Amino acid sequence: MRRTLISLCTALALTLTGAAAAGPAQAAARGPAPGTPTPITGADLVTPLSVAAGRGSSVLFTQNFAGLLNRTDARGNVTTVYRTSTPGAEVGAVSYRFGTTFFAENTGAGPDPAPNTGLIRSISRGGTVRTLADVAAYEARVNPDGGVRYGFRDLPASCLAQVPAEVPGSYLGEADSHPYATEPTAHEVFVADAGGNDVVGVDRRTGRVRTVAVLPPSVTHVTAQAAQATGLPACTVGHDYYFEPVPTDVRRGWDGWMYVSTLPGGPEDPSLGARGAVYRVNPSNGRVQLVAGGLASPTGLAFSARGDLYVAELFGNRVSVIPRGSHTARPFLSVPLPADVSVKGCTLYVATNALPGDNAPPAGQIVRVSLAGERRGSVGPNQDAD
């Protein structure tokens, strides 16, 4: 990725915080009506970009920029599960299954001058921390999207020379890793790599890493209005720009496919419209199919027990739902800056206010919302009942 997801999110958060106030909840045409969001943590979390329902009534969440993995219990008591010992390291991508917690610890993504590492780790129920693999090392060696051309593909050289330096005119996928989400199965941990633009699988026993799929670029047709808004020269009008897809979450669906949210690696403000998408990926052969598009910065996914897919739209200030079998996302719940979602039984957990405003203290919070209509005690397609 030319710029890290964190850089994109932080820059835009400074300009959008004023518009991030929560509005009234909106129910989808099909699916449970939302309850009232109830906080389960204080409103002082530092960039809670990842959340996962844990054992029993516990909820796991990361404070990415603080390098923390935390757990809160039913009484709201917050404990530290893991704290990085590496200065500047980010801790995120939390998931839970089989009594084991999985997460990522990474450094050096995008323009960060630190060495690029992407450690996928697990914590046993007894507290033993194990490093499964370094997906950044795999990215450096294999670079799965190295043959994909991003930017413009058909501009004459004379026009390409006029493209501003801050807009990459035409380039091949670069080796860069930012593991942003994990999804464990019986034998593998699937990783959405926002830097690598792909989904990889990590063998839980051997640590072997494989490429599952490279996500397709996000294609934007340059109109006169878009060119003016982004500072592109007039000669680019009528051409297509291929943005990097930037995978932000991966979840196993009711059909056995992996569902992946993508955040285009370009401006996330309204100038180019809502360009985020959800794809599904066949984990056996890498086949990719579009599920839904037109999403405003989708950064988190969660399936309910009956197969409805909830989507955190970070800069859309809402959680949407894609009913099982549908290809349309419908507004479900208005909350400020939701970064991630998780479902257990009939409860939806949401990480809100995930990015701080300009010169404002951290205000991140984990809230829960009742999903009326879900079967109590049921679990989603990839959750434990313990």
Image (spheres, rainbow, N blue to C red):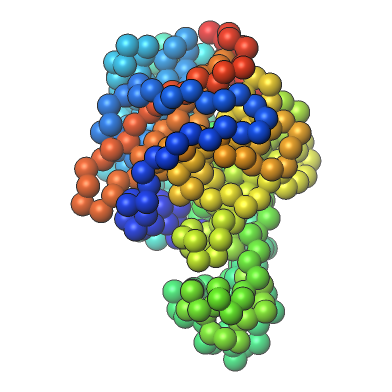
Residue 77 or residue 180, whichever sits in front: 77
Is 278 above or below relative to 29? below
At 28% from the left and 49% from the top, the residue drawn is 357
Q: Nearer the viewer, residue 109 or 64?
A: 64
Residue at 52% from the left image edge and 73% from the top image edge: 168
Q: Is residue 311 visible?
A: no
| Count of numbered marks | 0
Q: Is residue 143 above or below residue 206?
A: below
Residue drawn at point x = 65 percent, y = 70 percent = 221
Looking at the image, the residue that sits furthest to the bottom is: 158
Q: Nearer the viewer, residue 217 or 227?
A: 227
> In the image, residue 205 lies at what x, y percent?
60, 24
- Position of 380 with respect to 284 (left or right) is left
The answer to whether residue 385 is left or right of residue 318 is right
Q: Position of residue 103 (x, y in %)?
A: 46, 31
Percent from the top left, x then y, of residue 119?
46, 38
Q: Is residue 38 visible?
A: yes
- Corner quadrant of residue 303: top right
Residue 326 percent coordinates (x, y): 74, 37
Residue at 42% x, 40% y: name it: 23
Specify whether 37 is left or right of 345: left
Instruction: Tell me if 58 is positioned left or right of 188 in this view.
Output: left
Task: From the viewer's side, name the closer residue of 174 and 299.
Answer: 299
